[in-house]
Amino acid sequence: MDDVFRIVRERVPDLVIERKVKRHEADDDDWFFIRMATNPDPLSLECRPGGQPPFVVYDEYSSIDAPDSATAAEAVFELLSA
């Protein structure tokens, strides 16, 4: 997950990242909301525990499965620019 954030921040320095708080102990995925500071609509990024792949990047209209950090970062760019 750190690699995804690092890659995205290189191209989008005003990135805002918020982590979803676990609601249930059964929740084993990590879930983040990502948006540009100038846009209130976030995308979601989910990963396995500990920030491990695979990743799922999605917004209201699209969902992209990403097997690794580089693919997840590209998916974030794609959805942020949509």
Image: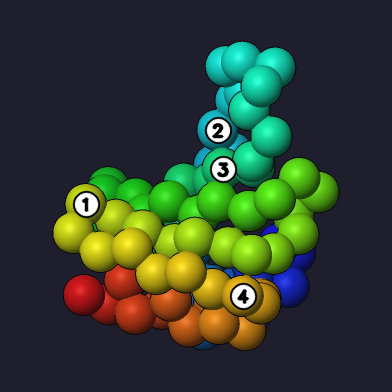
Quote the CA–CA distance across marks 4 and 1.
21 Å
The first of marks 2 and 1 along the sequence is 2
81, 36: nearer the viewer: 81
Q: What kind of residue is marked 4?
A: Pro
Q: Secondary structure at mark 3?
A: strand
Q: Dot 3 corresponds to which residue? A: 31
Asked whether the beta carbons under mark 2 and mark 3 sit within 8 Å of each other, the answer is: yes
Residue found at x 43% / y 51%: 44
What x and y, as percent, mark residue 63? 33, 63
Give the quarter of the figure containing the N terminus: bottom right
Quote the CA–CA distance across marks 1 and 3.
15 Å
Quote the CA–CA distance across marks 4 and 3.
16 Å
Instruction: Give neighbour class at mark 1: few <14, some 14-19, many 20+ (Cα, 10 Å).
Output: few
Q: Secondary structure at mark 1?
A: loop
Asked whether the beta carbons under mark 1 and mark 3 sit within 8 Å of each other, the answer is: no
Quote the CA–CA distance across marks 2 and 1.
17 Å
Q: Dot 2 corresponds to which residue? A: 20
Instruction: Give neighbour class at mark 2: few <14, some 14-19, many 20+ (Cα, 10 Å).
Output: few
Q: Dot 1 corresponds to which residue? A: 60
* 20 lies above or below 60: above
Using residue 78 as the reference point, say whether residue 66 is left or right of it.
Answer: right
Q: How many marks?
A: 4
Residue farthest to the top, as pictured: 24
Task: Tell us which disc is closer to us: 4 or 1.
Answer: 4
Asked whether the beta carbons under mark 4 and mark 2 sit within 8 Å of each other, the answer is: no
Q: What kind of residue is marked 2?
A: Lys
Residue farthest to the front, as pictured: 26
